[in-house]
Image (spheres, helix red, strand yellow):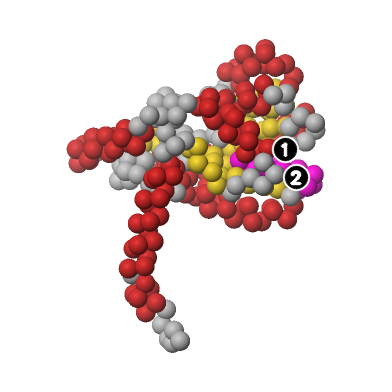
């Protein structure tokens, strides 16, 4: 039986690649986009196996309606991909309240709404797989994208708790953590805070660091097979990197954290108070 998918942010980037991959192997997909006309070429290729849906994931009622429509059209939901999101650039001091709230509305609350809308169907059928698209920036953090990092850290925490809560219902959760890829994440889809001149020099340094981290960016098309393998796995990972750069970043980051925690362990223990015997 073909796998059924619900994918947000399917108009471009990873969402479009994974929609295409699923359709090409014979699966059925409900694909959402703010402008579903961006999916017209896929509708022409794959017909009624693709259900294009207009959706702004920050609208909870619209999310509930879209997931219900997808379930009614497909008959079930096997894989739910929370991919919709964008990058907010700006130093922490520069980011406005509106920009910070908008970043969390899309990257965190959007994923929360889709997850909450899908779970009743997944629980009832006793199966399903939620793919939460995070980032290497969801376990590490970098200058000039701190609010974006914060949103992905929140998604990581939400998803790890979720995995424990739904395992007993036969529902699986995988947090996907891509490194640098040749998508428009830092281009047309990105948003930028108004720059403060105090950070101009450091901004250039941070941009140079980001270019160095990106190195040779990955090919989004190459992620298709990886995601299909994750979806088809009998025991999929809770977390998985995409790309050959994130593991090195994570290793340096976590080794540094562990070293600091160990160095300060006497202070930590003393702060417990009372007897430690």
User: Which badge, 2 or 1, is on the more N-terminal residue?
Assistant: 1
Specify start and end residues of the magenta stretch as a single range: 115-131
Q: Nearer the viewer, residue 118 or 161?
A: 161
Which secondary structure lies at badge 1? loop
Q: Is residue 195 left or right of residue 74?
A: left
Residue 264 higher or lower than 217, as above or below: below
Q: What number is the disc on residue 203?
A: none
Q: Is residue 119 magenta?
A: yes
| Count of numbered badges drawn on the protein | 2
Which secondary structure lies at badge 2? loop
Where residue 228 appears, as percent x and y from the top left, is 63, 33
Residue 71 higher or lower than 256, as above or below: above
Where residue 272 appears, as percent x and y from the top left, is 42, 78
Q: Is residue 80 left or right of residue 257?
A: right
Q: Is residue 273 left or right of residue 223?
A: left
Q: What number is the disc on residue 127?
A: 2
Residue 237 higher or lower than 3, as above or below: below
Residue 200 higher or lower than 22, as above or below: below
Q: Residues within 10 Å of mark 1 (few under 14, many from 20)?
A: many
Q: Nearer the viewer, residue 224 or 71?
A: 224
Q: Identify the residue at horizontal 67%, vertical 33% (top origin).
A: 6
Q: Is residue 231 left or right of residue 100?
A: right
Q: Quadrant of residue 50?
A: top right
Q: Is residue 192 at least partly visible in the picture?
A: no
Q: Identify the residue at horizontal 50%, vertical 50% (top origin).
A: 154
Where residue 57 appears, as percent x and y from the top left, is 58, 35
User: Which residue is disc 1 drawn over?
Assistant: 78
Q: Are the residues tagged 2 and 1 within 8 Å (C-beta)?
A: yes
For the N terminus, which image quadrant? top right
């Amino acid at each position: 039986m073909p796998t059924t998918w619900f994918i947000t942010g399917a108009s471009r980037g990873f969402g479009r690649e994974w929609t295409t991959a699923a359709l090409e192997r014979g699966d059925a997909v409900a694909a959402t986009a703010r402008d579903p006309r961006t999916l017209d070429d896929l509708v022409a290729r794959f017909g009624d196996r693709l259900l294009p849906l207009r959706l702004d994931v920050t609208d909870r009622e619209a999310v509930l309606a879209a997931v219900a429509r997808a379930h009614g059209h497909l008959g079930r939901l096997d894989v739910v991909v929370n991919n919709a999101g964008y990058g907010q650039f700006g130093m922490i001091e520069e980011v406005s309240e509106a920009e910070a709230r908008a970043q969390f509305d899309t990257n965190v609350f959007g994923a929360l709404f889709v997850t909450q809308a899908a779970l009743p169907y997944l629980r009832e059928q006793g199966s399903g797989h939620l793919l939460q698209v995070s980032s290497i920036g969801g376990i590490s953090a970098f200058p000039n994208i701190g609010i974006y990092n914060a949103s992905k850290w929140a998604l990581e925490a939400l998803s790890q708790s979720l995995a424990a809560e739904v395992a007993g219902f036969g529902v699986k959760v995988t947090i996907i953590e891509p490194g640098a890829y040749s998508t428009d994440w830092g281009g047309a889809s990105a948003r930028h805070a108004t720059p403060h001149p105090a950070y101009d020099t450091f901004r250039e340094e941070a941009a140079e660091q980001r270019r160095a981290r990106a190195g040779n960016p990955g090919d989004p098309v190459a992620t298709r097979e990886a995601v299909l393998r994750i979806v088809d796995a009998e025991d999929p990972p809770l977390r998985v990197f995409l790309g050959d750069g994130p593991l090195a970043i994570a290793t340096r980051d976590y080794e540094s954290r562990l070293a600091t925690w160990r160095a300060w362990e006497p202070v930590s223990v003393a702060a417990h108070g009372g007897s430690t015997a």
